[in-house]
Amino acid sequence: MIVSYQPGDSVLHRLNPMAKLSVVVAYCVVVFLLASIKMELACLLAILAIARAIGTRQVSAMMVSRFALTLFVMIILLQVIFTRTGTELVSIPLYVAHLVVTDDGLLIGVMSALRFLTVILISALFIVSTDPVALVYSLMRAGIPYRYGFMVILMMRFASVFALEVKTVCNAQKMRGLQIDEAGVKGLLRSIRYTIVPLIVSALSRVDGLVVSMEGRAFGYGKTRTFIVQDRYSWFDKALILSSAMAILLTLAGAAVGLYPLIQTMPWMRPI
């Protein structure tokens, strides 16, 4: 499932991209620090509630998508297979060994699956509500060199162009009678042979034109650049950035006084 930016006028859409990015980073850090299934589940439900409040369906659809469900099951299975600590619950005989399922394995598996699913969903929520161009400009105004920011913008712009180019090349080769959609290794090699080369030639020609245009405009001459739209931070944006930093500190402080365990206290993180 492809998640993309959806224009809107919700509170989340109107926030500064840097404020939303700071919240995402703090949220992911806190989620990976915690070692409680209840708190991980609460973080996951909070994301779904925000997605429902702004009216987006992409995040909710990703929750029940085949990718999310497969990832959830695979993480649990891997933890169950490789975790040997804890009380044995089930012993399944196999051809070469016994698969021992322990309570620690199930606990760590469910917790890890919830953790990764939470990170994926909050990242999807960030993508849905944030204009990528505005995000890059905010990063450049925050101190990232504008050459790197411009490279990211070009990547985003050329992604759709190259997708259209792939479709055009495939249709042109089919009109010439070439079978480039056959199944198997032979069909894959034929598809690569008759589509990659035209795409590379087309991409190089576009890059040459872009380089000449950038040199003609003296791109990269100055160390800094100007912006038409000024990056504004409301009091709410500043509060979110400050709250994000405080959330990490409070999580560590709460674990220090014994309110809840951190991930370092899990059996598989203990020193031997």
Image (spheres, rainbow, N blue to C red):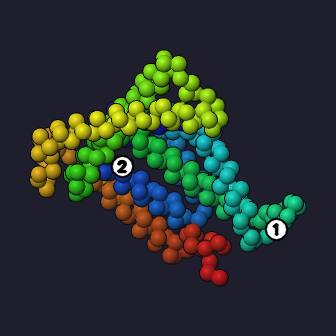
Q: Mark 1 or mark 2: name the one nearer the start of the chain.
A: 2
Q: Position of residue 184 (x, y in %)?
A: 65, 35
Image quadrant in which the C terminus is located: bottom right
Observer-nearest of 88 and 78: 78
Q: Position of residue 87 (x, y in %)?
A: 79, 70
What residue is drawn where x is 63% and y is 38%? Answer: 185
Q: Which residue matches tag 1?
A: 88
Drawn side of residue 102 relative to residue 161, left or right? right
Image quadrant in which the N terminus is located: top right
What residue is drawn where x is 40% and y is 27%? Answer: 164
Observer-nearest of 184 and 68: 184
What residue is drawn where x is 29% and y is 42%? Answer: 153
Drawn side of residue 211 relative to residue 133, left or right? left
Q: Position of residue 263 (x, y in %)?
A: 57, 68
Location of residue 81 (image quadrant)? bottom right
Q: Amino acid at mark 2?
A: Lys
Observer-nearest of 103 and 213: 213
In the rendered image, the vertical position of residue 110 relative to residue 151, given as above or below: below
In the rendered image, the vertical position of residue 13 relative to residue 103, given as above or below: above
Tell me if I can see residue 67 in this picture.
yes
Q: Amino acid at mark 1?
A: Glu
In the rendered image, the vertical position of residue 85 relative to residue 223, given as above or below: below
For the residue carrying disc 1, how many other residues have a C-alpha within 10 Å: few (<14), some (14-19), or many (20+)? few
Q: Which residue matches tag 2?
A: 20
